[in-house]
Image: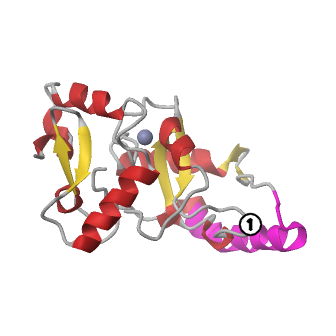
Amino acid sequence: MNRCVRSAPPEPLAARAQEWTRRWLEQCAAKGAAEFRWPQVDSKPLNQHLTESLRAMTSEHCSYCDNWIPPGVAETIDHFRPKACGRFPGFAFEWTNLFLTCWVCQKAKGEQFDELLLKPDEPGYDFDRYFVYRPRTGTLEPNPNASPEDRRRADRTIQLLRLNENGFPRARQRECNLIDAAAFRFCQGG
Ligand SMILES: [Zn+2]
């Protein structure tokens, strides 16, 4: 999980997030289990207006597993705090709650959430603070020198996002053998 720096919210979201949030909360209140849909903006769904900014934020990589996501292909927007009614519907249009992810991570995370989960753009987040990369196995482990609380968060993040499953260890080993391995923060780890 590479650190990323959050940009300002893209225009349609900045201008209308409050309105859309209010509407979504009303739908939840009315039905209890409403189906979430991105609102249409200029004849296309809102998520399509957001991906460019999100892609720029992570240099086109998944916010969680760091795999490169080819433009327009297998990308999705994850709600860090699940947007569903009864979970965190007030965060459905919260810019800081949205992350570009690959489909594998989106599926692994699903509707799960834990307050311990690390956020790649949170203040103080840095790969080395929480994780070490083991080149031999391609796996991530909590940094043994981190504080107990930091180790707990790293461990929970690895488990919940299944960062040592789904072929990710192998993918990391491949990335770190490439010429541009320096782009991947984790390659310099342990
Ligand atoms: Zn991913």
Q: Is residue 33 above or below residue 22?
A: above
Residue 165 on image: x %, y %? 40, 36
* Residues in magenta, as a range: 13-34
Whether residue 43 sits left or right of residue 161 in the image: it is right
* Residue 41 visible to the viewer: yes
* Residue 53 visible to the viewer: no
Magenta segment: does it hold 19? Answer: yes
Whether residue 113 sits left or right of residue 60 in the image: it is right
Q: Is residue 112 above or below residue 179?
A: below
- Asked where in the image residue 153 lies, by quadrant, the reply is bottom left
At label 1, counting other C-alpha atoms closer than 10 Å, the crowd grade (few under 14, some 14-19, many 20 or more) is many
Residue 166 on image: x %, y %? 43, 33
Q: Main secondary structure of the magenta part?
A: helix
| Residue ID at (41%, 51%) | 159
Amino acid type of the residue tagged 1 in the rendering: Cys
Residue 101 on image: x %, y %? 47, 44
